[in-house]
Every structure is written in structure tokens, then in C-alpha cells.
Image: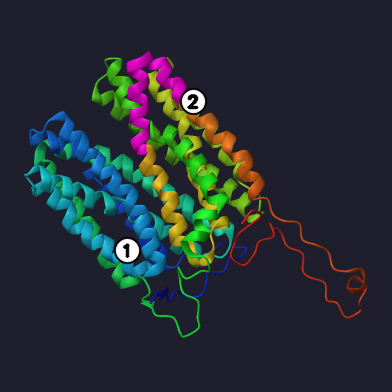
Amino acid sequence: MPRTPAYPPPVRSSASGTRWPPLIWVLLLGTFAVRSAGFVYPFLSFRLAELSLSTAIVGYVLAAFGAGWLLGQLLCGWGADRYGRRTTLISAMAVAAVAMPALAWMQSTAAVFAAALVAGVVYDASRPITSAVIADVFPTESARTRVNAARHFAVNVGAGLTGATGGLLAGRVGTDTLFLINGVVCGVFGIAALAVMPSDHRPRSGAPALGAAAGGCGQVLRDGRLWLLWLASLAALTCCAAMFTALPMLMYADGLAASSYGLTQVVAAIVVIALSPIITPWLTHRAAAGTSMTGLFACSSLLLGIGMGMAGLVSTTPGYAVTVTLAVPGEIVLFIAASDILNRVSPADSRGLYAGIWGTTLAVAVIVSPLLAAWALNTGGGRLAGAAILACGLIGALLCVPLAALTRPKPVPGPPAAARHSPHQVPEPSGVGRPVRRDGAFQGS
């Protein structure tokens, strides 16, 4: 039987702000910790090289990890709705605590392949679960936007620390120790979740259950808003993923050292830290006013396409640093705007599944971006690679046109003339925001 989470009443916003409950702090700090110690993905190729595997086998193993990542977003999102947020997160972190070190210890090709697949499933498992919990706990879009911005900030800073600390430690302690640390941190996150997250419980007879919405998966498959958001996000995130997939390929082709690429990532982290406190309050204000963020999403996709597309025109470390600086604001806005749109179109009983489906866009983008860059570099060089990235940004922006039409709120019909003049009618309080149904869906559902 499906389970529902026994969450406390939703947090209420006030003029003085919203106090985040311990549950949210644990999820944010846990996200930061597992991202900071997320050594498995960026250092997996180095580990495979230590095993003297052929280039073809390395490619297959990396593809298995990517396939696991994609599958994990769907499984964890579905599991969060079907079995509960707490159960799914703790189970995923327990598997990660075993799979990460196992990936370092395995020697045979078949064992490494299997371990990479499982590690990919749980590598980003907390993303759809955390998205669902944020939507559960915070009833207003402004509060959700603020928390999602903090989560994106934690992910970016954590990713920067992963490269910096991993690069310093890999030569001293080896990749196997890095993978062990990754597993230990996941285990600690799971223990913290066990202690703080409310228990999942079976619903009372007749009570609605998570994942038990009418229509089930069929409703999700028919939701054109979700799939337009998915396609637009994939196009934009392909540009975003170019920062850590296509960018090093372009820099290597220009004869620049790995340290030069590391410098661009440091610049990216600095820009995130500098701009997030400025951009986030503005986006939060727009969310509180009920303003659609599809336009901002389109602008962020264009900015990512232009910024990373310019990488095909430069050949020096300062030049690449400038392209990253231009692209990072688009990345900040993209994740916050996408989260806002996703929250508005997700039915309350399918938030985990919707978040999981959307989360697959990053996994697919991580696969598509290097393939696209490699094809372009081999076919026409850096300029074609830059043009291909720019095209992805343009596609993401264009897809926002039909997305905006489907998410536009339906006009609220006025009362009949007789009712309008009834002396017993109590006027409804005026409010700011877009009209929504109880399930959070807009026109086009």
C-alpha cells in the first residue's frame, strides 16, 4: 500500500520571513555534503585508467554510470511518492554507502560495470526527494524559490569543492580512498535523515495516498506541460553541462593544461557566490507575485547558449574564464525558474515522480553535451562546437513559447449577475498570484 509522509503542517510565511524547519536544513546540508564529497563521477575515469581498461570499456562503464543516473531519478522520484520520502532517501543513501566503495574495490570488468550502474542510480538520488519535500513543507512559491535557490547554491559550491579537494587528495591517497569518503558521507546523510525526517505512514482507509492519483502514470505521460519543460530543460542544460564536459575538451584542443580548466571552475564558483545573494531575492519577489517564470527560463537558456557558445571563439584561459562568467548567471536563473515551473505544474500526489522525471534532464544532458562537442570538434573545430551549443540555447528558449501558453492561468469567470448583486454575498479577499487548482496545475492539464 502506498505511504504518505507524516510531515508537520506547512510552514507559513510572514512579513519577517519564513523560518526553515530542521528537516529542510538537514536536506540542504546533506545535499552540500554529498555534492562536496561526490568524487565518484568526476574521478571515475581516473579509476578506470588505473585498471588498465581499454578505451572502449571505459566508455561503456561511463555510459553505464550515466544510464544509472537517469534511471535513479525516475526510481527515486517514483519511490518518494509510492513508499515515502524518508524511506526512499534512507534506502538510497544506504545503497550509496556500499556502492561507492565497491566501485573502487572491484577488479573484474563485469563487476566494475555493475557497480558503476548501481552507483549511478544513487549518485544524485536526493534531488527529486528534496524537491518533493520542499514542495510539501512550503506552501508559497516565494518560500519554495528561496529554498531552491539555497539548494542550487549548495550544489554549485559543493561541486567546486569536489574538484578542488579531489584534485589535491587523489595523488596522495588514491581514488579508492576518495570513493570510500564518498560512500561514508552518503551513509552519514542517511543517518541524519533517519533521525530528522518524519516517518512515512500508511494512510487511513479512504485517505488519498502519494502516487495514488487518478490516472497514475498515464496522467504524467499526457501532461504536455511537463514534457515541454523537460525538452526545454534538456536543451538549456546541455549548454550548462558544457561547462564541465565540452569546455575541457575545447581547452585541451587549444593546448591548455588541466590547471587552466580548474581556474575556470574557480571563477564559476566565485561568480555563483557573488551573484546568488543578488539574483535570489529578485526571483523570490517574482515568485511571490505569481509572475510566470517561463520568460526568465527562456532568457537563461539564451544566456547559457551565448556564454558557452563563445567558448568556440576563444583560445586563452582568460577568454574561457569570461565565457563561464557570462554563462553562470543563466545557470542560476535556470535552476530556480525550472523549479518554480515544476512546482506549479506538479500535482500534490505526484511531486516526487514529476521531480524525478525532470531530474533526468541533467543526466541526459551530461551524456549529450560531450557527444555533441566531440562530433562538432571532429567535424568543424571549435567554432562549430560553439555554434552547436548556441543552437541548444536557442532551442530551449523557443520551447518556452508553447510552454508559456500551456501554463498560462485560466481566467476566473465572474459570478452571475444575480449573485453579483446579492446582499448576502461576502466579497472574496483580493490576493496576488495566479489562479491555480488545488493540484497546482494550470491551463493545459
Amino acid type shown at disc 2: Leu
Q: What residue type is labelled 1?
A: Leu
Circles 2 and 1: CB atoms closer than 8 Å: no
Q: Residue at x 91, y 77 (%)?
A: 422
Q: Name the secondary structure under disc 1.
A: helix
Q: Which one is in front, 237 or 27?
A: 237
| Stretch in magenta | 366-388
Residue 384 in magenta stretch: yes
Asked if residue 218 lies left or right of residue 97, the reply is right
**Which mark, by number, is residue 390?**
2
What x and y, as percent, mark residue 256? Answer: 27, 18
SS of the residue at dot 2?
helix
Place of residue 49 in the rendered image (x, y in percent of width and height, measured from the top left): 12, 33
Residue at the limit of the structure toward the bottom, as seen here: 205
Quadrant where the C terminus lies? bottom right
**Is 58 drawn above or below residue 313 in the view shown?**
below
Q: Which residue is drawn at 22% across and 52% down?
A: 118
Quadrant showing the N terminus: bottom left
Which residue, given by chain and number where applicable, does mark 1 sit on?
89
Where residue 60 sits: x, y (%)?
21, 37
- Going 53% across and 51% down the picture, which residue do you hit? 226
Depth check: give the residue in front, 220 or 263.
220
Residue 237 is drawn in which quadrant? top left
- Along the horizontal axis of the image, is 356 left or right of 12? left
Of pointers 2 and 1, the one earlier in the residue sequence: 1
CA gap between label 2 and label 1 equals 37 Å
Q: How crowded is mark 2: few (under 14 residues within 10 Å), some or many (20 or more)?
A: many
* Image coloring type: rainbow
156 or 237: nearer the viewer: 237
State which quadrant residue 409 falls in: bottom right
Q: In this view, does 395 lie above or below 201?
A: above
